[in-house]
Image: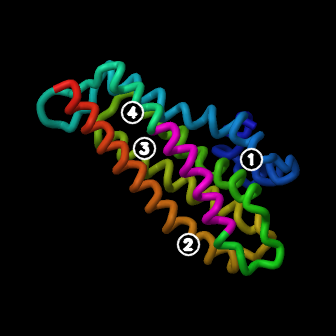
Amino acid sequence: MIHHVWGLLAHPNQEWRQIEHEGDSVTQLYVSHVLIMALIPVVCSLIGTTTVGWNFGEGGAVALSMGSAIALAVTFYLAILLAVAFMGTVLHWSARHFPTRPTRNRCIVFAGYVATPMFVAGVVALYPIVWLCSLAVVVGLCYSAYLLYVGLPAFFNITRKESMLVFSTTMAVGVLVLEALLALTVVLWGYGAAMIS
């Protein structure tokens, strides 16, 4: 399933068709895709915040101790895993009026693949400069939105016009979840920085 990463980034229409035929379960998705891909932003943040430190453009960078960074990384990792499941639940709820409504499990699988660009964008955290990380988040979000837009009609077996309601609802909630994750990251990082002061 990790092999879908390149396909989703390079030729998403073809890759969505292949994913649809595989019929992965939530357990399969998490074990072979989400658990691995979610490590990218977590491990990169861990390395970046302990070796380089956060740079806000003023003065020197502030680095975390390894102990603080590991505790924060575990919390961040769990939050990402929960966010994927939550977004799958949002997709399931959004499709409640469609006759061919997919199961909640299939919606979580779909959400896990849609999040792939966000996971990949996390590599930028190796060098944690605020403007660079913000740019990576925006690019990842835009490509995740594109994957959602392309994949929804086939996934829900609906027309492009019908998929726009699900798309807009999912994107609105997705942006709120992303903002919550970013806020949690800032709060946790601030807590870790306060611990070493």
Label 1 and label 2: CA atoms lie apart by 24 Å
Which residue is identified by label 3?
A: 136
The amino acid pointed to by label 2 is Ser
The amino acid pointed to by label 1 is Val
Label 3 and label 1: CA atoms lie apart by 27 Å
Q: Residue at x 81, y 70 (%)?
A: 157
Q: Is residue 158 above or below residue 148?
A: below
Label 4 and label 3: CA atoms lie apart by 21 Å
Say whether disc 4 or disc 3 marks the residue closer to the N-terminus: 4
Say whether disc 2 or disc 4 marks the residue closer to the N-terminus: 4
Label 2 and label 4: CA atoms lie apart by 32 Å
The amino acid pointed to by label 3 is Ala
Label 1 sits on a secondary structure element that is helix
Q: Residue at x 46, y 61 (%)?
A: 175
Q: Residues within 10 Å of mark 1 (few under 14, many from 20)?
A: some
The amino acid pointed to by label 4 is Leu
- Which mark is nearer the camera, 1 or 2? 1
Where residue 11 sits in the image (x, y, percent)? 71, 48
Q: Is residue 119 left or right of residue 109?
A: left
Residue in the foreground of this view, choosing between 122 and 28: 28
Q: Which mark identifies residue 72?
A: 4
Q: Is residue 115 above or below residue 41?
A: below
Q: Is residue 52 left or right of residue 103?
A: left
Which residue is identified by label 2?
A: 168
- Point out the image quarter for the N terminus: top right
Label 2 sits on a secondary structure element that is helix
Which residue is identified by label 1?
A: 26
